[in-house]
Image (tube, rainbow, N blue to C red):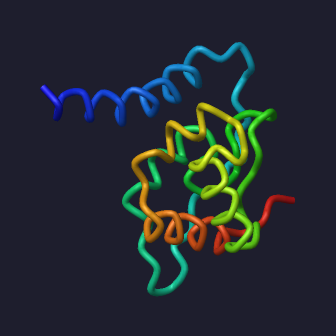
Amino acid sequence: MPLLRIFLIRAVPGLLVLLLGACSERAPRSSGRAAVAPTGMQPPAQLGLCAACHGASGHARQADIPDLAGQKADYLFKAMRDYQSGARNVPLMRGVLGSIDVRQMRALADWYAAQPACA
């Protein structure tokens, strides 16, 4: 039973993100940009959690979601740490980042920083 509870606590926030995106009344933006893997860089394993809203390339799918492409890696890393700790009080982001460790956050920050910035 404890494993089921842990799974539900970690999986439900991610599922909510996907469902909220699918039920949104706003039309998704289409940037037409594909994610670019810089030489020697592999997409992070957790990219799907972020890409549901921010896009794999860091170009958000909706106007009210921030673009991450081209942001400074240290800024993105600190923002993720702040969301996870509750210093930035956004329950949805806290739930999504709840199961991601520091190494994984750094990989996500580096990935989005390496993407071409939004125009």
- Where the N terminus falls, by quadrant? top left
Residue drawn at 50 percent across, 86 percent down: 39
**Residue 2's x, y, as percent?**
17, 31
Q: Is residue 33 visible?
A: no
Query: Depth check: 72 or 97 in front?
Result: 97
104 shown above or below 30: below
Query: Depth check: 43 or 16 in front?
Result: 16
Query: Depth check: 114 or 11 in front?
Result: 11
Residue drawn at 59 percent across, 49 percent down: 85
Q: Is residue 75 visible?
A: yes
Q: Is residue 34 left or right of residue 116?
A: left
Q: Residue furthest left?
A: 1
Q: Residue furthest bottom?
A: 40
**Residue 28's x, y, as percent?**
69, 29
Residue drawn at 68 percent across, 64 percent down: 78
- Where the C terminus falls, by quadrant? bottom right
37 shown above or below 60: below
Q: Residue furthest right?
A: 119
**Where on the picture, by quarter, is residue 27?**
top right
**Residue 105's x, y, as percent?**
51, 63
**Where on the picture, by quarter, is residue 21?**
top right
Q: Is residue 6 left or right of residue 110?
A: left
**Residue 29's x, y, as percent?**
73, 35
